[in-house]
Image (cartoon, rainbow, N blue to C red):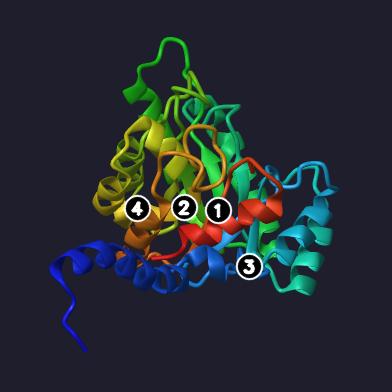
Amino acid sequence: MAPLSRRAFVATAPIAAASAALPIARAQDPAAAIPARPAATPHTRFAANVEMWWGKLPFLDRIRAAHALGFPAFEFWPWRGKDIDAIAALAGELGMACAQFTAWGFSPGLNEAKNHDRFVDEIEASCAVAKRLGCDKMTVVGGNDVKGMTQAEMHEQIVLGLKRAAPIAEREGVMLILEPMNIRIDHKGHCLYGSEAAVRICRAVDSPMVKINWDLYHCEISEGDLCGHLRDGFDQLGYVQVADNPGRTEPGTGEIHYPRVLKELHGLGYRGYVGVECRPSKPEAEAAQALWLADQW
């Protein structure tokens, strides 16, 4: 066979290279392998937030819908006003876990001493609910700014309140997860934002059952450098939530490169549930496919 001339080689080489690359690209395309139940991901155990997903459905049907997409767990906001026994029965029937729920919200604020007695009583009641659900984590919120108090004073009151509740959490085996928010977009006037302050508070409380609900959406807005902050404060991480920014929609719709962040989290040793506290920008079945893609690395 006659050798290929230099001119012919130059002309045909790009075509040959492109042709050779096509089957490799297809084979490595994660989108081509998305399963019918995309929330059943290989690395990350996602928990659907059934307050923000399927909002038009009755509450129990949201849990059924999460199961149909492959979510191994679900999370929700306050437990009061919900049929806890029905939720527990359905979770058992479907083989799903309740990853966490909210035990103490924005108001009255944990950042005021006058509310601490009520806080302790509510943690006792919420632990009893957690036991019924087979749930081992509950979110607590710091509270909005209090007129006449500095941020340092409010944070100190959060520490004192959590120290009072920590023995209950330790006795019951239910972790209190403190959630820092963001004040630029969603929670203007809130007293606790960014992971650094939350890490300081939890280290001051010094309990294995008081850690952080590390919402990566809030932290991206408040401080950025998600992987760096996770490394710095990993000893205080109790739970993780995700949403993309801007928009608080599913991963892959904004600026956060979630495959990188979830890989870092996995590498640090986190194996707990990751709450998907976002508003799907498209039908939920399609939004769940974004979770599959975020879990590919």
Residue on which disc 1 sits = 275
Mark 4 or mark 1, which is nearer the start of the sequence?
Answer: 4
Q: Is residue 286 above or below residue 197?
A: below
Q: Is residue 63 above or below residue 213?
A: below
The mark found on residue 193 in the picture is: none
Residue at 33 percent across and 51 percent down: it is 206
Residue on which disc 3 sits = 72
Mark 2 or mark 1, which is nearer the start of the sequence?
Answer: 2
Relative side of 246 to 9, left or right: right
Neighbour class for label 3 at 10 Å: few (<14), some, many (≥20)? many
Q: Secondary structure at mark 3?
A: loop
Residue pushed farthest front?
Answer: 2
Q: Secondary structure at mark 4?
A: helix
Residue on which disc 4 sits = 236
Q: CA distance from mark 4 to mark 2?
A: 11 Å
Residue contact between numbered discs 1 and 2, judged by CB atoms under 8 Å: yes
